[in-house]
Image (tube, coloured by chain):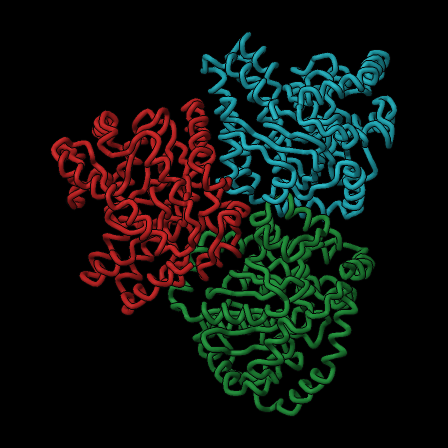
Chain colours: A green, B red, C cyan
Amino acid sequence: MPLKKPHNGLQNGDGSHEKDSRHFGNGSQQQNTDLNDHEGEQNLPSVLEVSNDSPVVNGIGSSLANGSLNLHSTVKRKLDGEKDYVFDKRLRYSVRQNESNCRFRDIVVRKEDGFTHILLSSQTSDNNALTPEIMKEVRRALCNASADDSKLLLLSAVGSVFCSGLDYSYLIGRLSNDRRKESTRIAEAIRDFVKAFIQFKKPIVVAINGPALGLGASILPLCDIVWASEKAWFQTPYATIRLTPAGCSSYTFPQILGVALANEMLFCGRKLTAQEACSRGLVSQVFWPTTFSQEVMLRVKEMASCSAVVLEESKCLVRSFLKSGLEDVNEKECQMLKQLWSSSKGLDSLFSYLQDKIYEV
Amino acid sequence: MPLKKPHNGLQNGDGSHEKDSRHFGNGSQQQNTDLNDHEGEQNLPSVLEVSNDSPVVNGIGSSLANGSLNLHSTVKRKLDGEKDYVFDKRLRYSVRQNESNCRFRDIVVRKEDGFTHILLSSQTSDNNALTPEIMKEVRRALCNASADDSKLLLLSAVGSVFCSGLDYSYLIGRLSNDRRKESTRIAEAIRDFVKAFIQFKKPIVVAINGPALGLGASILPLCDIVWASEKAWFQTPYATIRLTPAGCSSYTFPQILGVALANEMLFCGRKLTAQEACSRGLVSQVFWPTTFSQEVMLRVKEMASCSAVVLEESKCLVRSFLKSGLEDVNEKECQMLKQLWSSSKGLDSLFSYLQDKIYEV
Amino acid sequence: MPLKKPHNGLQNGDGSHEKDSRHFGNGSQQQNTDLNDHEGEQNLPSVLEVSNDSPVVNGIGSSLANGSLNLHSTVKRKLDGEKDYVFDKRLRYSVRQNESNCRFRDIVVRKEDGFTHILLSSQTSDNNALTPEIMKEVRRALCNASADDSKLLLLSAVGSVFCSGLDYSYLIGRLSNDRRKESTRIAEAIRDFVKAFIQFKKPIVVAINGPALGLGASILPLCDIVWASEKAWFQTPYATIRLTPAGCSSYTFPQILGVALANEMLFCGRKLTAQEACSRGLVSQVFWPTTFSQEVMLRVKEMASCSAVVLEESKCLVRSFLKSGLEDVNEKECQMLKQLWSSSKGLDSLFSYLQDKIYEV
């Protein structure tokens, strides 16, 4: 049962995530509260510093203009360029912290006409890497979107990287402090994050503007339509960094790509270009980077003009045969990660080794 | 139990479909009657105005020579060109109506050496669109072919369009008269049509000469080998025309194409060229239009030289793991369509809107 | 329960396979004995006439330099070229038959750093065709590898052909002697061979240097990573040679390639080039023939540097949803083959007809 505490966005922004998580323990059932939340958000779009056309929509495509394949430098350049913007955003947060409306710190949520737009825009990790806190924000946004009147969800990212997967520096830091407790906490955060995608009933469109790594790539088959910029690429080097697969990729990747390619990705860290991912079924279609965001918006708006019932029932038909299987896979995968993290001794050195590796292109 | 009434082809030709449907309610069990039917047909090939080489075999490939992508004009030109032929055919029907042998109006069935050839050649709908009556004819032909000594089935179409799916003008007409009764009748006709493909035990080869839309594309994964002319293309814009998926496409499309592309087809009406459909697994192989029919015939005849037991047992092995699942999917999909058709208010306007849309290329 | 008899490699080499098969009836449980076997083997690498770099590793790629598409002549040329080598090997066998260490006649097994390398190198059949005796050798080697400290398995072939599937001349010979008994024996040998792949817990990497036909192609989806030389090609003309599918291909091929292409392979003997097999998911990646063996070795060694636990648990996650299904399929397929072989009358003539056919390119 949800606690009757005021929904103050900054409770998430300032770290009080633990308490809030109870609201999401049972999936996406909190319609009233969440709808209220959303109305608050809807009334104050400018608070998020996301105007209707430029900064966010550009976020999908614009910073991809630089063709550099060195992720580190690309990202640094981007962060330099956006430093003022970030600072500005932070400032506004602190200014408005009593207004209960800027409830997300590492994602941006925009309520559009007929759909909800979630943008990964992490302030607390590099390259949109995922921490338990960020995953909880996404879950909250999914929960809100499942209960409001939007017909579908658009997921994209601000910056030149879509999502670099789990935040390994965070992982190393936490696991070296208290391996037992933290391995459980982080594995459960992943499980709940993935479960939120499995259980989401409206169509999810993902727009991949750049690299999608690890968990950031694994969740794509849990979404319904995957549009990618030519600059996107995909990699899930789990075995290389001494992890077992997550995000249901141990099931969905062989299903979609065939065992041969799926295992090459999971075991050998094989990287797929956008075109390869498209020709093998992970991606629906690839677009030219300069017009990517417009192409996506055009299509999403057209989809949002469809009947809500048809969209949801169609997704239900497509997913019904997979759902329970995926939930089992998710449980097993996270159980295995917890075991690995709580037992393995050389974890820290491995992580540091592979944190370098993963960004080599 | 089948009624002991004489099988007169014109009963189907003149609209008395309701009574006849009882014969097919339980699948394809009516061996004796159907075999008798077939023998009659076999003895009178010329009645169907289908000589052994030119008009029908050409039907697969010849009229594709015009490369126009405007379906409407292509089809009209074709119909103009074949007007005399059509008229002639009708005439012969009326002449021979007491001979009980021209039992099909909208399809042509030819018994070849080792295989049965069914050609969609609709006289009562445009572009080989499907009505409950036409679907029943196909089911009858499948039933006959399952019981006779043919080793496999070849399905193709006369004209430049393979099959444009459900006949929407028919749908609108019927649903606007009696939404409740007609929604049930039409949904059940689709269910039984699709079920006949799921349950057919001999290999089905499909030769796709031109566009395959909606249900005409959805049933392809229920067939065993799909050969396509370079001029073929595939589209299942269910959500766009406010329908939920049919023909088991909610299951088979994600299975074959991956969720990302399958959903783009089902939700956004993404069109696949023959080459795309081939590279993604919906089509076995693509052939040059001018030699398409010969290539198909060559291969089908070679297949028909195999052992009947091996063909049927091989198909049994390949399909056994899918069969019961597909039957469930089919039931669910048709249940959903019935609900949509019996409840939705703006159906007519949607249909008219989309009937235009679907033929835009 | 395993018999306590000494493990002498030449028992397999000299034909006493029947007794030995009991050791493998229950999968790969015989850790102690097998480990002992393996240690013996490890100590005497030179006995197998396989030096660390040249003959075997070259075996993967070198003889592919001749681009001939005529399999017969290619193979004959190869055998001529290697005649001395073969003779030499045989000689060594007879010389060392009391040393209990050259336990394989038609395969070569090398224990490398972190992985086991099995090479098909049949002396008793042409083109690495499979007989029950050769399949038993592979099972023994898999059993050993499952129990020792290797982290993964590399499977490749000596010569220009990877594996030409069942040895049809062997089949014809045996079945014409005692159809009833031999059909059971051979079908069970296939069943146990395929089962050994299904149950193998460590990752299996296959390096396909040339043609992989019939059972030699069917088992690839039971392996985890499939790397192919540009010279490889794939064909499973089961129906053409009047057989039903084996090696779980009736399940795995439709799963990976889609029903349309899978059936074209199973029913019509459609041949896939390495590139086609790769783009459709049967193969992970294609390499240039001249550097194929090096590329494979490089990658296998890198994989072998991963944690054994992660490799095995990852494979377990990927395979867990398939395992029981695959075992059922395998049983059904072999049951069907047994029926065909014990009943069909014209089997011999068909076999002789198709033995020619299968090698036409």
Rendered residue at 59%/87% (across/down): A47
In x, y percent, where is residue B161? 37, 48
Nearest the eye: B59 or B99 = B59
**Residue C205 appears in which quarter of the rendering?**
top right
In x, y percent, where is residue A214? 68, 59
**Residue C100 appears in which quarter of the rendering?**
top right
**Residue C124 appears in which quarter of the rendering?**
top right
In x, y percent, where is residue A146? 47, 70
In x, y percent, where is residue B208? 42, 43
Considering only vertical position in the picture, is B100 above or below C352?
below
- Say left or right for C96 vs C19: right
- Say left or right for A194 vs B318: right
Residue at the top extreme, as displayed: C177
Position of the C terminus of chain B by quadrant: bottom left
Position of the N terminus of chain B by quadrant: top left
Nearest the eye: C322 or B220 = B220
Nearest the eye: B234 or A72 = B234
Nearest the eye: B179 or B122 = B122
Rendered residue at 74%/33% (across/down): C145
Tag count in the figure?
0
Considering only vertical position in the picture, is B86 above or below C192?
below
Rendered residue at 53%/33% (across/down): C265
Residue A32 in view here: yes
Residue C149 in view here: no
